[in-house]
Image (tube, coloured by chain):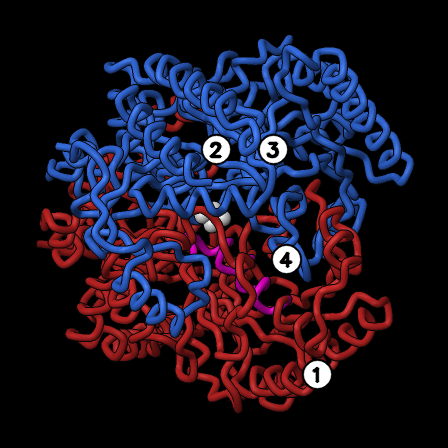
Chain colours: A red, B blue
């Protein structure tokens, strides 16, 4: 019940979208709106807008749709009256969980946990997942440092005034070009676009360079190895520097692929050494899989590609997982009460939907299929790059989590605009990158359609 | 279709709840769980647990249920197939809003906006509402300070490394005993329980005392006035002190009633002066109505009780509003792009449910009815206090947002425990406070039932 291809009847955004955007702007800043959508008629890989256009969607709500639009397995959840109470009675989950909560956590979340991780805490979005994931790391760091002694009265009293020793000067190392969310701690780890950060107070936390690999990788093996060594050396230097400032680094936070920052990849070796450095220094490692998790890279979790010597300490998720949350290793499961808590700590209705999604992913082998589709897509991108070397460079990706760079921002933006006018909806990241983020039901025939339109637009450039 | 009264068949938590709690604890820290619930059979003011007990609920999921359990108006939303796509296609709302989004914002949120506020930004929980509400204040503060000049290259560059001047050392003043959430900035404003804060890094932000009024208010008018003056003087002192540290106070954050901190009330005069101080100094005032908003105090917004000389700059909400978000004054509506943003910026399915809730509240006059029910409840609490002066003190409240104190923590906790064994479910806050937080469908007959059980338990103490 998908259409056979895009349908374009107006420019995009069309007159209805522009009218609605100006109405919305009277209520809130609507400057980021791209167009208004008709979610009732959108289907599978096709997103309909309010002007009657239907677009092949390779951006999928910033990579947050696991099964495209109106997937029957998700609609079935809504059809079933026995599920309705889960949608109308949102509980304070940390105090009063529903009867089937343990089973649902098992089948929706524990069953797809990263290797070596059996513990999971639900949250409600990517930001609170990272914020509370960090708290789990701070707790463990402080617990280790305390070596079993009780809290002192001075710690208890001083934390109520935000002062040390109760509120210790712990820090988190993050990477330049990373993005981890927009709440204060998350924004302190985010360094992709200055517009997100300017005028906001930020913690004085260390930031290291993330590798900028040269492509094609096989031609730059030694340069790239040197680049990664240099970034890892910077990690160690910064940790030492902040330790000397008596602001010890309790955690390192990293995306498996820096998405918003420009789809920056590093090699498995880089992540292996990062794991080893953090482990050696007893620093927590949080791998933020908010964008990479749930299969798009061809493995359920992107960090599985890295074959780390030891599992990460915390893995955060959201977006395609529908619910936010984090997995952690047994030793990082909070043992203290009332630390990782808020009114809702997640939403059972999202986990109910995720349960249906995980079942479809497993039954239809969507992660494996995404690996195959992704290889086909990346091959196509590489062919385009060979054909248009004056326009395209650095085709890269894992699974369908693919990207390709332009030689400048203008041509990238122009291509995305022209593609959209042909009914092909893609995203951007960094300053020169085309970001492809289709859902898990994207197939080779959709790749063909995309490449056909891509080539047509490239021909005009 | 509510039962006529509580039904108790086991101790609470019963064997099923205890079994499930231990199962859950294998997956995550489950130490805060009170009991597991059967949300399918819960109705109206009555919460069912998995052991077959049915409790009269005066805590309502930490005050987050506007219309009790399984209200037919909310279930109707789920029954209607034309609504299902809103639940299964969660959009990236800031980029791709749904067709009816402007109308829905109007009818669910703008229609109940605090007086003087027409702008609203949705968010997903109380914490992101406060975090992004603060960002709106920081933006405005920095914009005023910049006096129209453009961003400097130094600002743009330095913010990417979390350093001034791009990441300015702005601060937020909050009150001792306040609670505003658990993400980093929110936790920096939270000072109710040390367990929430210890071992977590916190920003060096000023904290002032919140008035500790003596009761009955009519007997302590001059003492309470002096207490409030002293707290307000502390506000000004702290602002001056942090200004001298070159960490200027850009915002003051306050709850209309400090809920988690012990249901601490201040007078309208206190809030009026606080508004005047902040206005005079060009500091933003954020009133956090996450717990007080949506009618429980007998007005839709609690700060309406204060008749401020000017509206607050930002008002945050969540809980009973089902969606998070914040209202702001016109001059605080962000004009800069990409500042108040994240993947989801809220959830249309929650706003759809809120639309149904607001309709019921309006049609049935639930806010006005809550005022009447609340007066009846408070009268009853005062009678109990007169009858048991050795146990109870400080009966207080607005609407059904009521509380009463015990002379010590043990007797408070013992009462709550015994009430629960009789099928009456209440909450606690502060160290000695019984917190009553029924939903908006709580009526005088429920008050009678509560008071009857309350008295029976008090008799045993
Ligand atoms: S911070 Fe995640 S939902 Fe509010």
Please provide the residue range marked out in magenta: A123-138
Residue drawn 54% across the image and 83% down it:
A267
**Same chain, labels 4 and 2:** no
Q: Which residue is mark 2?
A: B291
Quarter of the picture containing the N terminus of chain B is top left
Q: Which residue is mark 4?
A: A191
**Same chain, labels 1 and 3:** no
Residues at marks 2 and 1, CA–CA distance in whole angstroms: 42 Å
Horizontally, residue A354 falls left or right of residue B183, namely: left
Residues at marks 1 and 3, CA–CA distance in whole angstroms: 39 Å
Residues at marks 4 and 3, CA–CA distance in whole angstroms: 20 Å
Q: Are marks 4 and 2 in contact (CB under 8 Å)?
A: no
**Chain letter behind tag 1:** A
**Chain letter behind tag 2:** B
Q: Which residue is mark 1?
A: A281
Residue drawn 38% across the image and 22% down it:
A23
**Same chain, labels 2 and 1:** no
Main SS of the magenta segment?
helix
Q: Which residue is mark 3?
A: B136
The quadrant holding residue B261 is: top right
């Amino acid at each position: 019940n998908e259409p056979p291809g895009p349908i374009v009847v107006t420019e995009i955004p069309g007159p209805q979208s522009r009218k609605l955007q100006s109405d919305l702007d009277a209520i809130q800043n609507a400057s980021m709106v791209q167009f208004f959508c008709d979610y009732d008629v959108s289907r599978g890989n096709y997103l309909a807008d309010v002007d009657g256009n239907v677009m092949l969607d390779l951006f999928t709500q910033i990579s947050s749709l696991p099964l495209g639009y109106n997937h029957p397995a998700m609609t079935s959840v809504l059809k079933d009256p026995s599920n309705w109470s889960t949608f109308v009675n949102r509980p304070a989950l940390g105090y009063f969980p529903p009867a089937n909560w343990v089973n649902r956590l098992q089948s929706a979340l524990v069953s797809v946990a990263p290797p070596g991780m059996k513990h999971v805490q639900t949250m409600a979005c990517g930001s609170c997942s990272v914020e509370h994931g960090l708290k789990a790391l701070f707790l463990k760091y402080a617990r280790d440092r305390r070596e079993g002694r009780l809290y002192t009265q001075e710690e208890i009293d001083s934390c109520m005034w935000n002062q040390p020793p109760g509120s210790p000067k712990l820090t988190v190392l993050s990477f330049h070009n990373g993005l981890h969310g927009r709440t204060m701690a998350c924004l302190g780890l985010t360094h992709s676009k200055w517009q997100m950060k300017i005028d906001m107070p930020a913690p004085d936390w260390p930031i290291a360079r993330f590798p900028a690999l040269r492509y094609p990788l096989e031609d730059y093996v030694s340069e790239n190895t040197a680049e990664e060594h240099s970034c890892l050396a910077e990690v160690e230097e910064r940790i030492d520097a902040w330790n000397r400032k008596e602001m010890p680094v309790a955690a390192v936070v990293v995306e498996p692929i820096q998405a918003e920052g420009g789809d920056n990849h590093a090699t498995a070796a880089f992540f292996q050494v990062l794991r080893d450095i953090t482990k050696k220094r007893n620093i927590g490692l949080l791998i933020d899989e908010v964008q990479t998790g749930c299969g798009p890279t061809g493995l359920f979790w992107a960090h599985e590609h890295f074959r780390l010597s030891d599992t990460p300490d915390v893995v955060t998720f959201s977006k395609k997982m529908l619910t936010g949350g984090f997995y952690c290793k047994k030793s990082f499961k909070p043992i203290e009460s009332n630390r990782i808590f808020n009114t809702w700590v997640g939403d059972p209705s999202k986990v109910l939907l995720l349960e249906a999604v995980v079942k479809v992913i497993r039954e239809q082998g969507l992660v494996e299929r995404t690996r195959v589709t992704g290889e086909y897509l990346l091959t196509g991108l590489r062919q385009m790059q060979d054909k248009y070397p004056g326009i395209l460079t650095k085709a890269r990706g894992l699974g369908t989590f693919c990207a390709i760079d332009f030689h400048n921002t203008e041509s990238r933006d122009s291509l995305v605009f022209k593609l959209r006018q042909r009914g092909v909806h893609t995203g951007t990241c960094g300053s020169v990158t085309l970001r492809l983020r289709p859902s898990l039901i994207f197939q080779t025939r959709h790749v063909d359609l995309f490449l056909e339109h891509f080539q047509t637009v490239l021909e005009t450039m």
